[in-house]
Image (tube, rainbow, N blue to C red):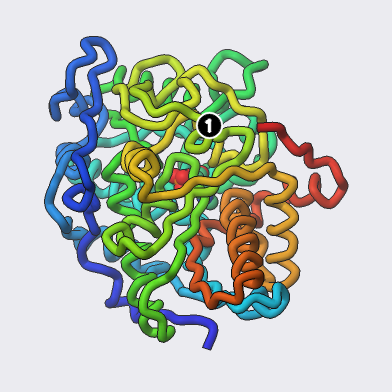
Amino acid sequence: MTRWTLPPGDIPAAWFNIAPHLSSPLQPPLHPVTREPLAPNDLAPLFPAALIEQEMTEAPWVDVPGEVLDVLRLWRPTPLVRATRLEQALGTPARIYYKDESGSPAGSHKPNTAVAQAFYNAQEGVHRLTTETGAGQWGAALAFACAQFDLECMVYMVRASFEQKPYRRVLMETWGASVVPSPVGQPDHPGSLGTAISDAVRDAAGRGDTHYSLGSVLNHVLLHQTLIGLEAREQLTLAGETLPDVVIAPCGGGSNLGGLSLPFVPDTGVRLVAVEPLSCPTLTKGRFDYDFGDAAGYTPLLPMYTLGHDFVPPSIHAGGLRYHGDSPLISALVRDGRMEAVAYPQGKVFDAALQFARIEGKVAAPEAAHAIRAVVDEALAAKETGEETVILFNYCGHGLLDLSAYEAYLQGRLPDERG
Ligand SMILES: Cc1ncc(COP(=O)(O)O)c(C=O)c1O
């Protein structure tokens, strides 16, 4: 057996909330102007009440609405796969498992929260959502979700990706969304997630019929993604494992990493590893401080690791990992020593992505390839020590719309950035 699936009725009925398990409560977000702790009402122009409540709740579990489950069932539960061919090729005693989130309509984990967010907005009578997107994965996920609940969708796409990745724009438009490059009106600026968030928030704040939707970073987003880790736990048991020794995922804003790893935080023996690009080393080289979530300073100040909200990372291919900040939950876990973080240059990341494609057959999204790099290194370390390490990682997206990155690598044109 190398693949464990669950029946459609076995999508977890509730999301796992990490808040009551933290060693100390998160510091509150601060109002961008007064710098006082944010009141729930401050967020009302941007988010529906249900999401604001989820952002702040201490309830250990939050029920998944039936309407959300009905859409998630189009592709969930997702398979857990054992990469036995990779194990053999590396000659490692480690057992390598991955949660395959690439089979969603948009090709990544992102629809797990997009569907929930679109549902709660539609339920509150909102007609239009705005958002930012880096590589286009999040924008595509929200475009799909908006189509399910009859919402208009306006996507501000980081200009560098808009130009490098035209097919994700077409995908978003196929689902009915409008897409513009960000920053708006600055054609020579490569853009960043920070500039795109500013554009999307400015748009939503200026219209009564519109809310804003964020694809990562916030507590409610990580909450929605915990279905990944909850399913993986059950599937690992089916595979004959008790718990993984190490859980590995790439980290841009923290949503796929949080989704896979948060349900394992209470299991103190399980190592949790965040993988980021050397050119945007938020967790490994950033400072822990309050900072804005966007470039222009419209959003609340969040307590997180940050490179500074005016940081513009180089245009690497893992566009989804180019964010100056990180989820406050992930940041707190790293600060408190519960989670490790490691950074790789993109050349080493693509070495591993190619190895994985040729051995396991799957062409990973550049973001997912960061996890694969760390997994290969972890498996090689196990080979040195002879330990039968159980490794679980998030295959958070496929790279079939990122082939320009593979082409650059194959043609020797992929620059290795400096940290
Ligand atoms: C496939 C994929 N993985 C990872 C990420 C990084 O985001 P996050 O850290 O929120 O999972 C993105 C972001 O767009 C993505 O598209």
Tell whether 410 sits left or right of 241.
Answer: right
How many numbered dots are placed on residues in this image? 1
Q: Which of 172 and 229 is in front in this view?
A: 229
At a point 16% along the width and 50% down the height, the residue shown is 20
Q: Nearer the viewer, residue 266 or 51?
A: 266
Residue 335 x %, y %: 37, 39
Give the residue pinned by disc 1.
285
**Position of the C terminus by quadrant:** top right
Tell whether 118 sits left or right of 364.
Answer: left
Residue 66 x %, y %: 20, 63
The picture quadrant where one finds residue 84 is bottom right
At a point 43% along the width and 15% down the height, the residue shown is 296
Q: Which residue of the protein is positioned furthest toward the right in this rendering?
A: 411
The picture quadrant where one finds residue 60 is bottom left
Residue 369 x %, y %: 62, 54
At a point 49% along the width and 41% down the height, the residue shown is 252
The picture quadrant where one finds residue 160 is top right
Residue 291 lies, with reference to residue 322, above or below; the image says above
Residue 47 lies, with reference to residue 257, above or below; the image says above
Residue 72 lies, with reference to residue 44, above or below; the image says below
Q: Is residue 174 visible?
A: no
Tell whether 317 sits left or right of 128.
Answer: right
Task: Identify which amino acid the numbered label 1 is placed on.
Answer: Lys
At a point 57% along the width and 55% down the height, the residue shown is 371
